Structures are given as structure tokens and as C-alpha cells.
Image (cartoon, rainbow, N blue to C red):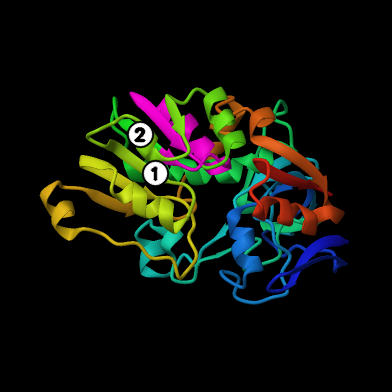
Amino acid sequence: MRAAVIESPGKAVLATVPDPVPGPRDVVVKVAACGLCGTDLHIMQGEFAPSLPLVPGHEFAGEVVGIGSAVSELKAGDRVAVDPSLYCQECRYCRTGRNNLCDRWAAIGVSAAGGAAEYALAPAANCVKLPDHVGLQDAALIEPLSCAVRGYDVLSARMGAHVLIYGSGTMGLMMLELAKRTGAASVDVVDISAERLSTARKLGCSGSAAAAAELSRPGGWDVVIDATGNAAAIQDGLGRVAKAGTFLQFGVADYATTAVIEPYRIYNQEITITGSMAVLHSYERAAELFAAGVIDPGVFISDRMPLERYPEALERFAAGEGRKIVVVP
């Protein structure tokens, strides 16, 4: 079958690889679409993936076409979205319900062959059936939405909070949509891209600017979310949290990224700094929210590119062009 392959840091190609063969509790999914994500860029930089070469792609959906001998809950023809998370179920964190912090955490498209291919292998337990009205090429958005849902689980959002989001790419826009639905009094968005900010305004943010200093909230924001992973944005955001507020590190930063905190201020103003790692008991809820129309695929997906243009799609994404880019086998 055809697949995109990251051969070495900085090099992605289209190649022919063996067709996936299901184990007893696996299924083979004919991929309808696979989304690109910041994690894919980190893999291209030689981070995250334990080894290369690798077929990337952890945001995908499609149709079941092959079934393992012990699979009874799925059948050929089922339309599914795939939770890429793989856990050991044995370490302390798995046994206490914090699977996303698993000591042997792995993921389809990160440590195992992913969905940037014509076919992908997945455990049956990771597949969520989709209703007929959900477009399979749109359902690649469910995985990033599940990460955003996890972010709001961490925030334990209060009604009436004033929220500031850094970044209006796919994840920042999803956080905006969820903030509106969790009772935020206002949601402001910061981004250096005028095009992306226009999308945030289209989705109904309260205010938008190229820098937070241009927005008016003298006491700071109750919730500040970084959805960029950019060091300058993170540093700026830490200084804009209101008393008793929360800073959520949601964007994926490079390993070497650092920021300076002010311990006395954190103590004196009871500021919380926290993070949100991938997916935790949120994929099924994201699938239900997606089916209910919480986000509009027509707004979020800016580019649909054929699989053979995967290297070009990565370049566009790395350049900050568009919003969500999906590849279609």
C-alpha cells in the first residue's frame, strides 16, 4: 500500500509499505482522511517518535475492512474514528486512571505506523463507531477535539470566567469553541496571523489582537491558555493571569523551550500553572460533541490534499498556512 514515511529527521517521502495484518484484537481501517498536527512536526525534527522510519498520522478516521479473529464488536463496513493512544495498563499511572501519563505511553502514528496511509492498523478497543451523518473525511477532527476536551477537564472551568487564548490555529479555535460552551464570560484570542484571527472573529471571540497588550483587561484573565508552544507567547501569558487564575500549557513546545516563573507572585496571588497531555477518557465524548455539531468542519479544515502530497502538506503546516490540513488517500 502507499503511505507517507518520515525516513529521518527532516525527510518525508511517499513509499510503498506492507499492508497491515490484524492481530486477534485488531482491525484494519481504510483511511478516509488523516489530519496533520504539531506532533508531526516534532517527529520530523527527530523528537517524540522512539525510532524512524515511521508512518505518521494520529488523527484519522475511515472504514473497517479487516477484522482480527477475536473481534466481535466491529464488522467490515463500520465507520470509525480511531483514538491513537496506546497504554500499558500496568504501570502506576494506568492503574490509577491516569493512562495519558503511562510510563510506557505510545500512540498510533507516533510509535507505531499511523494513518497517513491507505490503510492503518488499530486495536478494536480504540475505534469509536460514527453515525451516518458524520462525514468520514471530517472525522479526522475528532482526535484534536478530544485533546481540547481533556484540556477543559483539567481546567474544571468556572461559569463566568474571562479567558485568553494564545494561538488561533486548529487547537486554539477548538479551545475557543469549548470556552464559549463552558460558560465563559469572554474569550479573547491572540495571534500574529491576521488570517487566523479573522477565523477566530468569525467564530465569535470577544476580542482579538496581535498582542495581548492591545486587549483591555487590566487585572488579567481568569484563564490563560497557550495553544502555540511558542516560548514568547508562553512567557507573555504567564504574566497575564489574574489573581486566583489558571495558566494552562496546552500547546506542545519543543523539548528545549523554557519560561521564567515568579514564585512569590504564584504564592501570593494563588495562581495555578498546569498542563494537559493528549487524551484521557475524552475521545468518546469528543466524538459525541462532533456528531452534535460543536465544531464546523467547513471552518476548521482549510486544505484537503492527496496523500502523495504529504511532504508538501507538512511544509504548508510548518509555515503556518491555513488551519487544519488533512491528507486524503
Asked if residue 91 shows in the view, the reply is: yes
Q: Residue at x 43, y 58 (%)?
A: 231
Q: Which residue is mark 1?
A: 225
Q: Is residue 256 above or below residue 272?
A: below
**Does 121 appear in magenta?**
no
Rendered position, 292 above or below 75: above
Q: Give the crowd class for mark 2: few <14, some 14-19, many >=20 residues within 10 Å.
A: many
Q: Is residue 310 left or right of residue 52?
A: right
User: Is residue 190 located in the magenta-colored stretch of the structure?
Assistant: yes
Q: Reply above or below: 59 against 24.
A: above
Label 2 belongs to which residue?
163
SS of the residue at dot 1?
Answer: strand
Please tell me which residue is depicted at 18% across the width and 53% down the height of the picture.
266
Which of the two labelled residues, at mark 2 and mark 1, occupies the earlier sequence position?
2
Given residues 181 and 97, the one toward you in this image is 181
Q: Where does residue 200 sit, x and y in percent of width and height?
A: 53, 30
Q: Please, what is the three-letter code of the amino acid marked with disc 2?
A: Val
The picture places residue 24, in percent across and down from the top left corner, at 70, 63
Q: Quadrant of the rendered structure where residue 112 is?
A: bottom right
Which range is magenta? 165-191
| Residue at the image point whose x is 59% and y is 50% from the top | 83
The reply to whether discs 2 and 1 touch (Cβ–Cβ < 8 Å) is yes
**Where residue 208 sits: x, y (%)?**
46, 30
Residues at marks 2 and 1, CA–CA distance in whole angstroms: 8 Å
Q: Residue furthest front?
A: 214
- Residue 275 position, x and y percent, is 37, 54
Q: Residue at x 70, y 61 (%)?
A: 56
